[in-house]
Amino acid sequence: MRPSLVIVGAGPRGTGLVERIAANAPELYAGSGLDLHLVDPHPPGAGRIWRADQSPLLWMNSHAEDVTMFTDETVDMAGPVRPGPTLHEWAGIAGRTFADRRLQGDYLRWVHEQALAALPPGITVHHHPHRAVRVGGPREGRQQVWLEGRDRPLLADLVVLALGHLDAEPDAEQRSLAAHARAHGLLHLPPDFTADSDLTALPAGEPVLVRGFGLAFVDLMVLLTEGRGGRYDGDTYVPSGREPVLYAGSRRGVPYHAKIGYDWTGERPPLPRFLGPAQTAELLARPGGFDFRRDVWPLVEKELGYAHYHRLFTAHPERTALPWTDFEEKYAAGSGADLAALVAAAVPDPRDRLDLAALDRPLDGVRYASHEAFQEGLRGYIDADLTRRNDPSYSQDLAVFLGLLSVYGQLVRLGNLGTWWHGFFSYLASGPPAPRLRQMRALSRAGLLRFVGADMAVTAADKVFRAASPTVPGFSVEARALVEARLPEPTVGRARDALLRRLHADGAAETPDGLLRTDPADGRVLDAAGRPHPRRFALGPYTDGRTPGAFTRPRTGGPAFRQNDATARAALAFLRSLTLRAAA
């Protein structure tokens, strides 16, 4: 029998894996036949998230020039580099365009077709537009992949799960809120992908509580305003009269930072400096393991600070009080209070200092006397963010962005880091386009977006939902509708995906945060004893090897690309060994 490889998921991650199989096959699998099965109910390449049947009002949150599915020499991998066009090069659009998601889906479909065309002649591709519901089989034997609506399974020598973003069953709080809504005729929309949510029941002119201020909120805002016929006239929103009034808050109480609106010039910070391969190797080698806050976060802070101050001292030396060489030497040796004293002496303006705690929680300890005063205050916060993110005189912010990408590339190697880091990264580095924040400001002035504050608490009582925040003491708002504007947590135990839940029930290990445990070397699924499964791999956001995304910014190392290459090479080497044994 010909060897068989089943990839469950043919979206961007599955496509990236196929591209790496094509790139590595000439070295590792030349001259051998292989059946490659791609299983996905959604369109190949685009998958669920980037499918064509969604609103053209929904944008990407990256410039078209910052989106690629192709490797370059910055990716730390054993396989060959196979360059290709970025989204803006492929589509022939301006590099700083925020393309709509349907165009990105077209790009991903094209990349998928190119990856298939690059496979050697001996590899035959079979596409199955079905949902995989179970993987079975012995550790040392062929696997069975059962498909929805099929009586017989696919037989596989290896299975790779590239499932992408998944739906989740509600947690205890969400179940309680949903029960309250059913009992009193209210509307409760749990965490979901906004493009998939049915928003038609949200009433025009009525208050709607919204918990979440990230990218899912931006999508919700767009679909309930422009999506209902409103329009923008410059910085003024012209309503259609069909919009609800959104009362939005979150843990931080502020929207994600806008994308930076200028290009890099001059010398780049030499990264990694304090968190590189040597440091991650040392952490992984510790017999007792490591703790993120105690052992990893100080290295992250120092690395991001190094990126920040390197740029400040080299590009804006007039705002510093020491030569860079002196500062760098003392910074490398310092820690704690000594480091804070060094920064205070060398960087006179507090606006030029990096304070990650203040960035993460800008409303901590801030109180407003009235709800209206807070509306004005948060509009001022948005104004300041838009000004700074488009002012190259604060280009140390862009250096921190590059530092975040470098750090993420190292942290992926460490595996389980908890969920806080991913949220912090998205808040600083993966926020919305600046025009979206200008739209928030316009909607606020029009009275259709009202800010609630930080640590927004939602209670279900008196036949309504009620929201309040310590940012405005004494203020609360009631509504008959509540929307959780955030993605479902990618937990194994609560995943609605039948395949993943069965895998967990059969002994696949999960982290304390509910992510599927995988071998950081090649993505093999681990069991409770830490043993890697010889025939099962997993890649994506539901694993402890999760990366910022399946595609990335060019020339930034692409952690997902590195993982795809390692998994592809391990799979091809294993399949090649099967053919050699069969021949012998």
Image (cartoon, rainbow, N blue to C red):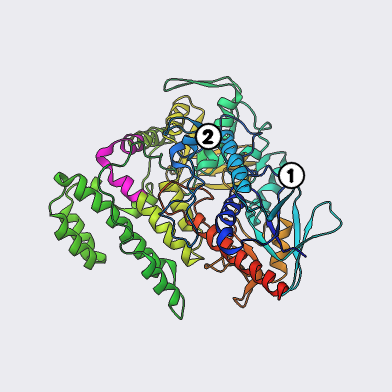
Q: Residue furthest right?
A: 151
| Residue 478 image position (x, y, % from top left) | 58, 38
> Residue tagged by mark 2?
59
Which residue lies at the image location 64% right of the left edge and 44% below the top edge? 47
Quadrant (top left/top right/bottom left/bottom right) for the C terminus: bottom right
> Residue tagged by mark 1?
183
Kindly state the secondary structure of the residue where label 1 is placed. helix
Q: Is the magenta stretch mostly helix, strand or loop?
A: helix
Which residue lies at the image location 41% right of the left edge and 39% below the top edge? 258
Q: Which of 495/516 is in front?
A: 516
Q: Looking at the picture, does residue 504 appear above or below residue 42?
A: below
**First to last magenta residue range:** 385-401
The number of callouts visible is 2
Q: Which of 315/80 is in front?
A: 80
Marks 2 and 1 sit apart, C-alpha to C-alpha, by: 37 Å
| Residue 428 image position (x, y, % from top left) | 40, 47
Disc 1 residue type (three-letter): Ala
Assess disc 1: are there few (<14), some (14-19) or many (≥20) residues with their C-alpha within 10 Å of its C-alpha. few
